[in-house]
């Protein structure tokens, strides 16, 4: 059974809504300031030439650009550290890197550069219009460029709709190696330990609690006779005899080898210890009677029940490749044509698989053993991966999202396959 870790990709509509909310402040400032700047341009004739006074455009345009850049840097820093923007917060989505952590400034900048490429081209054209004084043709130059830039930005944002890997990535996400998740419908990986998350998110099948019989539970309690004393005389505890010791409920009674204890019948008559049947009193090497050990004498030591072993058997997970090779899995395993571990994976088991057709990526899969099965993660492979459960249901793996696979299932990666079993 393939189960993800409560991660839900953000829908294209939510992505677009968040982007529009993030764009509106900067776009509004630019439109207003440039409109005021263009309206303040004056034209005069001097010596047969037309002279344009663009001081208002430079002033208000500079103010607009400065405010917009400051806003963009604030939003960029916020998203780089937390995956949040004003639009992301309102739409309930978060951007993250391919491991489910904060995306970082470089990835956020690249995503924004790709998304706003058309708008940046229009801004560059506006600068050229001012420099070369093409004011008469400004509307015909800037109008189409702004329209094309807006259409391009919308297409980039909603391009995740055409992503074949569950809508996890748009064109900008593929270039920046980022993911966007819906934290209202699923969990937020940034605040819960990345894509794999803490082990509390792993659906483990725990064995039922079994009753354990105590070795002394059914034993008959030993009652020590109490000597009656007259009411007129104060009772005093009997002085311990050097030849006998009172039995204790917590310490086992053991006869010293240097002296012989009194016979059980005599000790019982004196109220010192109960009488045990003679059949339970073995004879020592010196002819002395050794009092038997009662079942309650050592209640601190765990007794092993007959017919049961001290430790439960531990299942060992193994995989068998389609070429017949068999491997026992360590805790963390990387599978691929020539797998290489990332940061924190220096101790992972590297399992190289021959692939003459080069259908397997260099590091194709990450396997994490977890008791009853393994967590399989496709490491953004080129040809993808899938899982076939014992009932024949085949499910593609979402890149970057761990999937729980139980023994008896088959995992397909590229043109190769391995079967998961238990030893």
Image: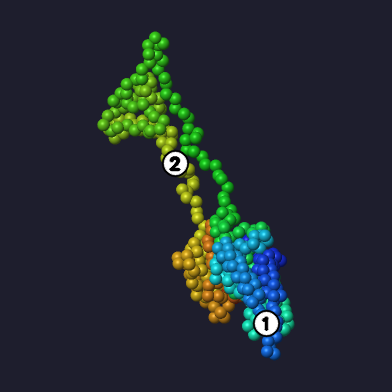
Which colouring convention does the figure follow? rainbow
- For mark 1, give the secondary structure: strand
Count of numbered labels shown in the rendering: 2
Identify the disc placed on residue 292. Answer: none
x then y, percent, for residue 366: 54, 67
Quadrant (top left, top right, bottom left, bottom right) of the N terminus? bottom right
Q: Nearer the viewer, residue 193 or 266?
A: 193
How many residues crowd mark 2 within 10 Å: few (<14), some (14–19), many (20+)? few
Residue in the image at 47% along x and 48% along y: 309
- Give the residue at mark 1: 52
Residue in the image at 57% along x and 58% along y: 191
- For mark 2, give the secondary structure: loop
Q: Which image quarter: residue 78?
A: bottom right
Q: Which image quarter: residue 55?
A: bottom right
Q: Is residue 68 visible?
A: yes
How far apart are the alpha carbons under marks 1 and 2?
A: 99 Å
How many residues crowd mark 1 within 10 Å: few (<14), some (14–19), many (20+)? few
Q: Which image quarter: residue 419?
A: bottom right
x then y, percent, for residue 278: 38, 28
Identify the disc placed on residue 302. Answer: 2
Q: Is residue 410 visible?
A: no
Q: Nearer the viewer, residue 344 or 142?
A: 142
Name of the residue lying farthest toward the top: 232
x then y, percent, for residue 332: 50, 64
x then y, percent, for residue 42: 70, 79
> As displayed, is residue 405 above or below residue 414?
above
Residue in the image at 38% along x and 33% along y: 251
């Amino acid at each position: 059974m393939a189960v993800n870790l409560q991660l839900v990709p953000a829908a294209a509509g939510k992505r677009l809504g968040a982007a529009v909310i993030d764009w509106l402040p900067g776009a509004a400032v630019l439109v207003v300031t440039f409109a005021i700047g263009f309206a303040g341009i004056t034209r005069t004739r001097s010596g047969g030439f037309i002279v344009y006074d663009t001081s208002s455009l430079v002033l208000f345009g500079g103010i607009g650009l400065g405010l917009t850049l400051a806003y963009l840097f604030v939003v960029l820093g916020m998203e780089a550290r937390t995956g949040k923007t004003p639009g992301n917060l309102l739409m309930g989505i978060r951007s993250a890197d391919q491991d489910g952590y904060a995306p970082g400034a470089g990835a956020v900048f690249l995503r924004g550069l790709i998304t706003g490429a058309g708008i940046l081209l229009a801004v560059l054209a506006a600068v050229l219009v001012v420099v070369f004084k093409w004011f008469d043709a400004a509307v015909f130059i800037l109008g189409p460029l702004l329209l094309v830039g807006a259409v391009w930005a919308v297409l980039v944002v909603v391009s995740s709709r055409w992503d074949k890997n569950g809508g996890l990535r748009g064109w900008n996400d593929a270039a920046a190696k980022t993911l966007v998740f819906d934290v209202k419908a699923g969990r937020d990986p940034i605040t819960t330990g990345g894509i794999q998350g803490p082990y509390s998110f792993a659906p483990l099948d725990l064995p039922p609690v079994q009753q354990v019989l105590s070795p002394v539970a059914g034993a008959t309690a030993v009652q020590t006779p109490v000597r009656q004393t007259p009411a007129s005389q104060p009772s005093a505890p009997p002085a311990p005899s050097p030849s006998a010791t009172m039995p204790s409920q917590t310490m086992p009674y053991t006869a010293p080898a240097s002296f012989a204890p009194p016979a059980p019948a005599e000790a019982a008559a004196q109220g010192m210890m109960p009488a045990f049947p003679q059949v339970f009193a073995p004879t020592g090497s010196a002819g002395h009677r050794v009092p038997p050990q009662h079942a309650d004498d050592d209640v601190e030591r765990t007794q092993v029940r007959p017919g049961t072993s001290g430790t439960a058997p531990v299942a060992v997970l193994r995989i068998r490749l389609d070429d017949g090779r068999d491997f026992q899995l360590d805790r963390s395993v990387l599978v691929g044509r020539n797998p290489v571990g990332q940061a924190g994976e220096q101790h992972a088991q590297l399992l190289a698989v021959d692939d003459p057709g080069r259908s397997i990526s260099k590091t194709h899969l990450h396997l994490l053993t977890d008791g009853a099965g393994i967590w399989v993660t496709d490491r953004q492979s080129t040809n993808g991966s899938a899982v076939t459960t014992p009932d024949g249901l085949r499910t593609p793996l979402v890149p970057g999202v761990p999937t729980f696979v139980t023994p008896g299932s088959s995992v397909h990666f590229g043109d190769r396959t391995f079967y998961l079993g238990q030893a």
